Structures are given as structure tokens and as C-alpha cells.
Image (spheres, rainbow, N blue to C red):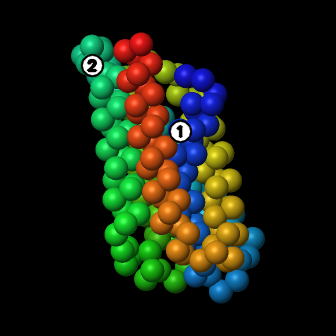
Amino acid sequence: MSFITILGLALGLAMDAFAVSIAVGSRLDRLAARPLFRLSFHFGLFQFMMPIIGWFVGSQIARYIQHYDHWLAFLLLAYIGIKMIWESWKHDEKRESLTDPTRKWSLIILSVATSIDALAVGLSMALLNVAILFPSVIIGIVAAAMTAVGMVFGRKLGARFGKKMEFVGGLILIAIGVNIVVGHLG
């Protein structure tokens, strides 16, 4: 898997974190260093860990599905992408009702919710027999950076912009899935 593909994948996965961080940044009274660090660190950490967990699960079943693994990877990425696009169109009351989601259980729940897609990506990488550590590091770093940028933008641009980024992230994931199938068939 090329660095450009990994970076595109990382950017696609980071769009959920980016969208949530914009919403969080737009709701905080002021943007202080601690909430910025907490959210960025946790989103990056979870985005790093989830592909590894997915990869270990996927590596256990890879030999059983090697003849159609590229299609499975495409379906997983397409599903995630379509889900992100769908969610970008619907109204999410949970995000709006939080007062400071950079604390306690809200932080953990948001970290898991924004990184669950990375679990499926890790599974896909195992099915494609791709090493996981380097992509996971890049995914985690990009997610942490996009979260920090999103919180800063959130103070300036508001929650309206976040939904559009979730839509773009979904399109990127679908495009990567198509690229995997085309690359395998070609």
C-alpha cells in the first residue's frame, strides 16, 4: 500500500473526528489547551488502536476468504463511506446536547464512535495482507492533527461546516475501496 493511499485513508478516517471536533470547538466557551489536547490525544490514540485490533481479528480469518478479500474490503469501506455520507445529512441531537465532551465518559464514547470505522479498515488491511503498524501510526497522527485543526476551526466556522467534511470523508473512503478492487482486478 503506497504512502499516498495510506494518507488518503487516514484523511478519510479522520473526517469523523474532524467533524466532531468542529462541533466541539464551536460549543466550548473558550478554546483552552487542555480540552484541545484531551480531544486530539484521545481521537488520535483510538484511531491508532482500532486498525490494529481490526487487523488482528482479520488476520485470523484471512486464509478462509482470500479469494474474495478485495471485494470484502471494498464492501467494508463502501459501507463506512455510505454511512458517513448518510450521517452527514441527518440531524444528530447527541452532538448538540453535550456541554463539554472533552471530559469523562463523553470523551471515551466520542473517541470510540469516531474511530469505529478504523476497526473495519484494519480488518480490510488484514484481508489484503497489508502490514498494519505504519498505516496505524499515520492514521493516529492524522486524526490527532485533524482534531486539533477542527477545534480551532470550530471556533471560527461553527458546526455547519462539520457535516460537509463528514460527507467528503465518506467519499474518500468509497474511492479508496474502488481503488482496491480496480488494483486487484487490474
What's under tag 2, amino acid-wise?
A: Tyr
Relative to 61, 167 lies left or right: right
Would you place residue 7 above or below residue 96 in this image? above
Q: Report the residue marked by disc 2.
A: 68
Q: Residue at left 35%, top 32%?
A: 74
Q: Residue 175 location, x and y as percent?
A: 45, 37
The crowding category of the residue bearing disc 2, from other C-alpha atoms within 10 Å (few below 14, some 14 to 19, many at least 20), is: few
Of residues 145 and 9, the one drawn nearer to the viewer in this rendering: 9
Q: Residue at left 49%, top 51%?
A: 169
Give the secondary structure at mark 1: helix
Q: Which label's residue is closer to the chain start, 1 or 2?
A: 1
Relative to 134, 104 lies left or right: left
The crowding category of the residue bearing disc 1, from other C-alpha atoms within 10 Å (few below 14, some 14 to 19, many at least 20), is: many
Of residues 179 and 140, the one drawn nearer to the viewer in this rendering: 179
Quadrant of residue 109 within the rendered picture: bottom left
Q: Report the residue marked by disc 1.
A: 9
Q: Residue 61 location, x and y as percent?
A: 29, 22
What's under tag 1, amino acid-wise?
A: Leu
Q: Quadrant of the C terminus?
A: top left
Q: Residue at left 62%, top 59%?
A: 147
